[in-house]
Amino acid sequence: MTEQEAINQMPTASGLSQNAKKKLPVSEITIGTYKESLLAVDILAAVILEEKSKPGVEVFLKRIVLKEPYCPNCSRTLDTTHASWMADGVQTGYRCSKCNTERKGTELDLYKDVDGEVRRNFETYWQTYTEAIHRLTGGKPGEFRVD
C-alpha cells in the first residue's frame, strides 16, 4: 500500500476515510449570472467541502470560474472580435453572429467586471454558494469528496 492509499484509508474529522466518502458529481457549481445589455456569462465557483467558516472575498474570488459569454438577447455563444493582423490580432470585444450585438473589451475586462459584481454582492453569492452545496450534499458535506 502506498503512502497516499494509507492516508486515504485514515479516518477524517467526519469519521469516514476518503475512499468511503461519496464522490460529489460536480466540482463547480453555478452561483449566478453576470448580465448586462450586451453580454451575459454564468458565474461558477469551485466546490470546497472542508470549509468551516466563510472565507474573505479575496479567497472566494480565487475559486470563481466563468463559462462562455453569451448574448443576453438570443442566448447564442458570443464570438470574439479581434484587431487586424497588423495589431497582432488582439481581442477587441465580443459579437453575436445572429443578432449582431457587440460589446467592446477583452476577456480581462470581463473578468474585472465580474470581479466587481461579486465584490459588491459577496453576501448574496456566498449564500447561493452555501445553499447549493447544502442541496448537493443533503446538508452533510463531510460525507462527500470532490475529485
Image (spheres, rainbow, N blue to C red):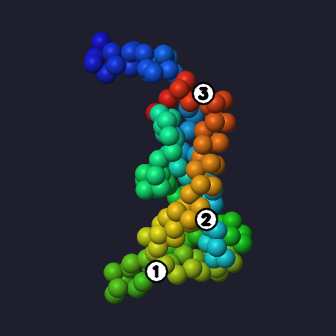
Q: Is residue 44 visible?
A: yes
Q: Residue at x 53, y 49 (%)?
A: 45
Q: Amino acid at mark 1?
A: Thr
- For marks 2 and 3, give the CA distance: 30 Å
Q: Confirm or deny contact between disc 1 and disc 2 (CB under 8 A).
A: no
Foreground mark, 2 or 3, reads 3
- For marks 3 and 1, give the CA distance: 45 Å
Query: Percent position (x, y) of residue 48?
Result: 49, 39
Q: Which residue is mark 2?
A: 34
Q: Which residue is mark 1?
A: 92
Q: Earlier in the sequence, mark 3 or mark 1?
A: 1
Query: Percent position (x, y) of residue 126?
Result: 58, 50
Q: Is residue 130 above or below residue 33?
A: above
Q: Amino acid at mark 3?
A: Lys
Taking the view exactly as shown, the residue that stands out farthest to the top is 1
| Position of residue 13 in the picture relative to residue 129 (left or right) | left
Q: Which residue is mark 3?
A: 140
Query: Percent position (x, y) of residue 118?
Result: 55, 61
- For marks 1 and 2, give the CA distance: 20 Å
Q: Earlier in the sequence, mark 2 or mark 3?
A: 2
Q: Residue at x 40, y 85 (%)?
A: 84
Q: Amino acid at mark 2?
A: Tyr
Q: Is residue 3 above or below residue 59?
A: above
